[in-house]
Image (cartoon, rainbow, N blue to C red):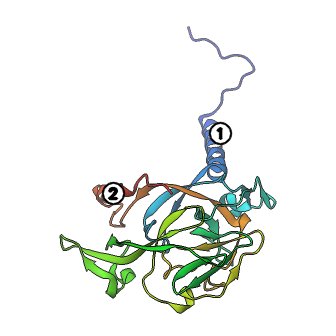
């Protein structure tokens, strides 16, 4: 014999349960993306050689504190900047650019408040001292749908031992005070980028540069050409690890290309 339902407890509908579950899931994702980790994809070549177009990485959100730009779409729920911590020179950060077409951007922290920054003949000077710049092996990247020949430029196009088309750039190793090292590209002498005035970083701001020094609209250039100094509260988080990478050749209707397009060796690379 069926057990009668308990009196006074109306049955919950499947629709109501589904709505509750979706609301809880949305809240969980909101909290996760705002305060713990969020994904970010690389849209340009400004951070070569470390980051390729088609790389996907996780950004940790707690390192520098929280502001409205920590939240999706910059929802103005956090006044100013709370639990604030300044980044370290050499950190790779994601931030919200300024202007009417503001969007998420990734660059490397070079100057902190009070620092002076200058480029002389392609060499970085920080607080009046030259940052060591050592020539290392060329950076080689295969040509692909994500990185076609027109992005490479004719003078840097080459082929590998199997005859496959590649792009080959001069690569250098910079070492900041304190020992933080990273690789940069320096393709040619471009006076507006390689010979600059002295920049003095204002309080509450950072000076950011792309590792691909001749192809990065960064703090060396004032808006709208570049981005100038970036306020600390616009920094969203710190790049942590690459979790996926694709050369752009995958097609949604051909699932086998999802694997053939993957650059598995890049997965798991940290910063």
The N terminus appears in which quarter of the rendering? top right
For this rendering, which residue is in front, 89 or 220? 89
Q: State the residue lying farthest toward the bottom.
A: 191
Percent across and percent down for residue 269 are 44, 55
Residue depicted at 49% across the width and 66% down the height? 182
Residue 200 higher or lower than 4, as above or below:
below
Residue 30 at x, y percent in the picture: 65, 50
According to the picture, the residue beneath numbered tag 1 turns out to be 20
User: Is 130 situated above or below 85?
Assistant: below
Which residue occupies 60% across, 39% down? 18
Q: State the mark number for residue 37.
A: none
Q: Which residue sits furthest top?
A: 1
Looking at the image, the residue that sits furthest to the right is: 79
Depth check: give the residue in front, 204 or 199. 199
* Left or right side of 49 for 198: right
Residue 267 lies in quadrant = bottom left
Q: Name the residue tied to disc 2.
A: 258
Instruction: Please give left or right for residue 40 compared with residue 85 in the image.
Output: left
How far from the left and from the top, in percent, is residue 106?
56, 67
Residue 172's quadrant in the figure?
bottom left
Write the residue at 38% across / 78% down.
Answer: 170
First in sequence: mark 2 vs mark 1: 1
- Of badges 2 and 1, nearer the viewer stands 2
Residue 23 x %, y %: 65, 44
**Image mark count:** 2
Q: Can the viewer see residue 20?
A: yes
Disc 1 secondary structure class: helix
Please say whether residue 144 is visible from this viewpoint.
no
Mark 2, other Cα within 10 Å: few <14 / some 14–19 / many ≥20: some
Do residues under tags 2 and 1 come within 8 Å of each other at their CB atoms?
A: no
User: Residue, x 30% and y 81% (percent of image)?
Assistant: 157
């Amino acid at each position: 014999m069926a057990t009668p339902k308990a009196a006074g407890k109306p049955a919950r509908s499947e629709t109501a349960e589904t709505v509750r579950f979706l609301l809880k899931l949305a809240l969980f994702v909101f909290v996760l993306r705002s305060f713990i980790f969020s994904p970010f994809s690389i849209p340009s070549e400004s951070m070569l050689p470390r980051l390729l177009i088609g790389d996907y990485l996780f950004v940790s959100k707690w390192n520098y504190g929280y502001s409205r730009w920590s939240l999706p779409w910059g929802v103005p729920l956090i006044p100013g900047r709370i639990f604030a911590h300044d980044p370290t020179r050499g950190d790779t950060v994601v931030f919200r650019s300024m202007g009417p077409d503001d969007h998420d951007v990734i660059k490397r922290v070079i100057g902190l408040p009070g620092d002076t920054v200058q480029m002389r003949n392609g060499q970085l000077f920080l607080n009046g001292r030259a940052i060591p710049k050592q020539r290392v092996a060329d950076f080689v990247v295969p040509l692909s749908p994500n990185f076609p020949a027109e992005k490479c430029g004719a003078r840097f196009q080459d082929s590998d031992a199997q005859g496959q088309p590649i792009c080959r750039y001069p690569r250098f190793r910079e070492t900041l005070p304190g020992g933080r090292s990273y690789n940069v590209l320096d393709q040619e002498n471009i006076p507006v980028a390689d010979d600059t005035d002295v920049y003095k970083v204002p309080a509450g701001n950072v000076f950011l540069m792309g590792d691909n020094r001749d192809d990065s609209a960064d703090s060396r250039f004032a808006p709208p050409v570049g981005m100038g100094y970036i306020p600390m509260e616009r920094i969203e988080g710190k790049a942590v690890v690459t979790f996926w990478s694709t050369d752009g050749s995958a097609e949604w209707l051909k699932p086998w290309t999802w694997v053939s397009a993957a650059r598995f060796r890049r997965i798991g690379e940290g910063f």
